[in-house]
Image (cartoon, rainbow, N blue to C red):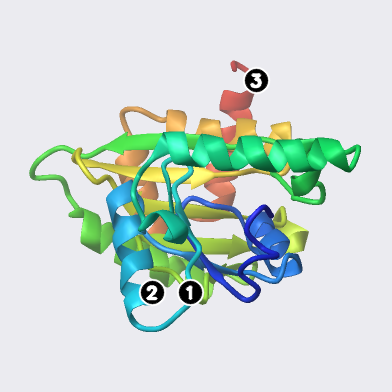
Amino acid sequence: AVLAPQYPGGIVVTDSGTSSGLTQFLGKQGLVHHRFKRGYQNVIDEARRLSDAGFCVPLAIETSGHAALLENRFLDDGMYLATRLVAAMVQCRRRGEELAGLIEGLREPAQSAEYRIPLKKGADLPQEELLARLSGFVERHPALSPAPENHEGLRVNVAPQAGDGWFLLRQSLHDPVLVTVTPPASVVETISQRVHFAEKAEKSRLLIDLLEGKRPVSEMVETELVLRGSV
């Protein structure tokens, strides 16, 4: 919002874990959201690549807060960013406004959860095949659809009648795990998702059977209801 007046139509590069609400907010500011990969260096390198290709890219920013601005040669410089925000705050105060008012209208999820699923060496399915099977399941599910633009893992949009949200399953940058980011719309959905990932002895087999169609979704729901009572 601070940069929008100076860079109309500019591209903001973020990591893969940013929300659809941010995409809509940037669009209303006259900016374009380009969701890329996790890792601040990946985000900065993508911004530089687009800039070198002739696109206007005023900002590269990760959800952790790492940010690099075009006007500062895409340096990961927290002091520069802080100074830029202080200057914007002064301008807001002169107009009788608050800095936080610049992001008014940004739609955020009620809650957000991240799960790290450990995978042992020699597991039944390597990470790449697990993602491929999940992709096939998503294509067959009427309430799920793969995100049209995605550069990391599998990002899935959930239809309004099934929760109106999204989830992302990707490989970790450093550890042998799969990471899923799920911003649910309500506390109830958070409980439901936690229950699914709380299975210990059979969680890998349950997921594989579900993706292969060997185990009906109703059985997973029954398991969820039984476990929910003990949470």
Q: CA distance from mark 1 to mark 2?
A: 19 Å
- In which image quadrant can residue 15 be found? bottom left
* Number of numbered callouts drawn: 3
In the rendering, which numbered label is found on residue 149? 1
Name the one closer to the observer, 59 or 175: 59
In the rendering, which numbered label is found on residue 51? 2
Could you say where residue 226 lies in the image, as x and y percent from the top left?
60, 27
The amino acid on which the numbered mark 1 sits, given as a three-letter code, is Glu
Q: CA distance from mark 3 to mark 1?
A: 39 Å
Q: Earlier in the sequence, mark 3 or mark 2?
A: 2
Task: State the residue at coordinates (35%, 27%).
Answer: 200
Can see residue 156? yes
The amino acid on which the numbered mark 2 sits, given as a three-letter code, is Ser
Identity of the residue furthest to the right in this view: 96
- Is the N terminus in the top left, top right, bottom left or bottom right quadrant? bottom right
Identity of the residue furthest to the left in this view: 122
